[in-house]
Amino acid sequence: MKKVLIVDDEVIPRKSLKSIIPWAEFGYTIAGEAANGKAALTMVEELAPELIFTDITMPVMNGIEFIRALKEKGISAKVVILSCHEDFTYLRDAMRLGAVDYLLKHTFEAEDIRRLLSKIDEQFRKEYIESESIEWLRQDLWKRFLLGHLSTGEKIRYRLNGLIPEGPGLFRILLAEVSSRNTIVSFLESYRARAGDKTGLDRIWLVNEGKIPSGERVFLIFSFKAGCSEADTAAVVHDFYGGLCRMAAKQDHACNAAGSCLYRNWAEIHEAWKEAVEGMDMKADLSKYGQKVRQALTYIRNNYARQISLEDISGYIGISRIYLSQIFKKETGQNISDFLLGYRISRAKKMLMDSDLKIYEIADMSGFGSAQYFSRIFKEQTGMNPNEYRTHSRS
């Protein structure tokens, strides 16, 4: 039920308003009463009423000052004025401040209240439909933004309207799969309430991906303030995911996630989305291997862009090179060096298809070092040099 607060320094009008109709039949309940605006402000913060009836002429804080204070605090409750005939000037001021209607004190009847509630209910209904429409628009817009499906004109229009960010910006994407969407919505609300304690976190967007066999899939876009380090941003996302998993576990719900690295321009959001999706796919692929091999595969996929050796991988896992080589070949059917080469080639292929990076940049970013060495190995593996592959893949 919607909560009602009555604010009036006179007891009789308060009692009359409380008893004039069966409020519960109309979906309302009288949550509290106050004798002046100052006391009412405290009650508003405690009770969060949807509807407030307030007198104008009161001690300590009058109705106009009370309504102005509500507006300054961003409180969106509907306000109805309890007015006397001689309050016309004040009444006009109250309506300008956003009061939705008024009742003449000492003369209103039950039918006046019924008509008023019907009018206010219609306002609530329209606002709900509008908010749902806006949320649907934002969800649809962000999905298309993530997928790279917005035209240049749409990007300009939505950026001007502040619906999507633009230009330089620090962000990470977390793709989460949960048994119940309510779990992640509930945790996100509590996390946002304490997010001020998280170094550099600016905002979190939630985008619904849709139903999956195990529950729901959502994307969370974490935006960070300028100057945040990569380590700080990673710590925030890790902390969020850990808390989400703990909440899901308490509710006997499953939780799984994969994230992107730190990106520095909103124009790259589609790349971040793809990275998160690929990360989730990779986790699914890893589930069929033993723990040590999973660790080796994860290490390779996280570090392929730099020069890594068998010693680096075995040292990270904490086992000998010989034992790692044996179990890796047994479980994957490949030598580690062959898998690393194949993975680097696959990442280079994606960059050739999806970006306009120069060949030497792709060579460096995929772990090959020199462009000459990269081109030679790439042709050996694919039968085409990098430029030929790029042209062929886009034709």
Image: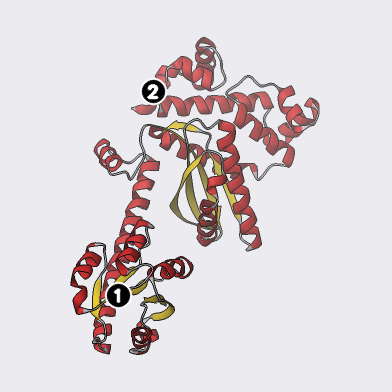
Q: Please determine whether, in this image, residue 109 is positioned above or below residue 376.
A: below
Instruction: Find residue 340 and report its image quarter.
Output: top right
- Mark number, residue 121: 1
Q: Closer to the N terminus: mark 1 or mark 2?
A: 1
The answer to whether residue 207 is visible is yes
What is the quadrant of the C terminus in the image? Answer: top left
User: Residue visible at 69% across and 36% down?
Assistant: 295
**Residue at the spot 52% in from the left edge and 22% down from the top edge:** 365
Residue 272 relative to residue 300: left or right: left
Disc 2 marks which amino acid? Answer: Asp
Q: Residue at x 38, y 81 (%)?
A: 27
Q: Position of residue 219 (x, y in %)?
A: 47, 48
Residue picked out by circle 2: 356
Which x, y percent locates residue 267?
Answer: 38, 33
Q: Quadrant of the N terminus?
A: bottom left
Give the camera-side residue of 320 and 143: 143
Q: Which residue is at the front of the view, 244 or 259?
A: 244
**Label 2, residues with CA under 10 Å away: few <14, some 14-19, many ≥20:** few
Residue at disc 2, secondary structure: loop
Q: Quadrant of residue 88?
A: bottom left
Callout 1 crowding tier (Cα within 10 Å): few <14, some 14–19, many ≥20: some
Q: Considering depth in this image, is 318 or 325 the residue closer to the camera? A: 318
Q: Up-down: is 355 above or below 184?
A: above
Front residue of 394/308: it is 308
